[in-house]
Image (cartoon, rainbow, N blue to C red):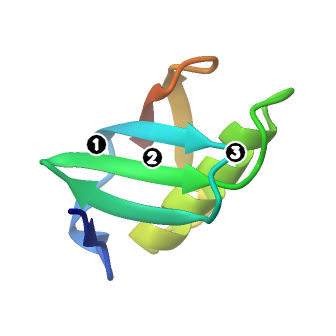
Amino acid sequence: MGVSLPGPSHLAVAGTCLSLRVTAGASRDGTELRDDELRVRATTAPEGGKADAAVRTRLAQALGVPKSRLRLVRGRTARDKVFEIS
């Protein structure tokens, strides 16, 4: 069972890389911490980078930072992604 992330702003430190597991095409959007793994669900289908953009937006909301501070470092076509906070 996952734990909702009400405000993980403590993770929003410049230079930090966040590893996460993404579920694109999910039934609902969400961000949670499950078994020490950050998981992001996006309702957007994984076509043409649309899901990556939705995940970036959702992650920025959860962290309380502008999405311009998040850069996808690894995992453009994979479920496991790494975002760097600038």
Quadrant of the rendered image containing residue 34? bottom left
Q: Report whether residue 28 is seen.
A: yes
Kindly identify which numbered label has been placed on residue 58: none
Q: How packed is label 3: few (under 14 Cα within 10 Å), some, or many (20 or more)?
A: some
Q: Which residue occupies 60% across, 64% down?
A: 29
Q: Name the residue under label 1.
A: 16
Who comes first in sequence, dot 1 or dot 3? Answer: 1
Q: How far apart are marks 1 and 3 (CA)?
A: 27 Å
Q: Residue 12 at x, y = what percent?
A: 32, 60
Q: Which residue occupies 55% across, 31% down?
A: 72
In the rendered image, the vertical position of residue 78 relative to residue 58, given as above or below: above
Asked which secondary structure carries label 3, the reply is loop
Near-viewer residue (83 or 25): 25
Q: In the rendered view, does 32 fall on the left or right side of 61?
A: left
Residue type for callout 2: Ser
Q: Residue 4 at x, y = what percent?
A: 30, 74
Kindly identify which numbered label has been placed on residue 86: 2
In the rendered image, the vertical position of residue 26 relative to residue 7, given as above or below: above
Q: In the rendered view, does 59 fall on the left or right side of 14?
A: right
Q: Which residue occupies 32% across, 82% down?
A: 6
Q: Which of marks 2 and 3 is in front?
A: 3
Q: How packed is label 2: few (under 14 Cα within 10 Å), some, or many (20 or more)?
A: some
Q: How far apart are marks 2 and 3 (CA)?
A: 28 Å
Q: Name the residue under label 3.
A: 25
Residue type for callout 3: Gly
Q: How packed is label 1: few (under 14 Cα within 10 Å), some, or many (20 or more)?
A: few
Asked which secondary structure carries label 1, the reply is loop
Q: Report whether residue 12 is seen.
A: no
Q: How far apart are marks 2 and 1 (CA)?
A: 8 Å
Q: Residue 51 at x, y = what percent?
A: 72, 41
Who comes first in sequence, dot 2 or dot 1? Answer: 1
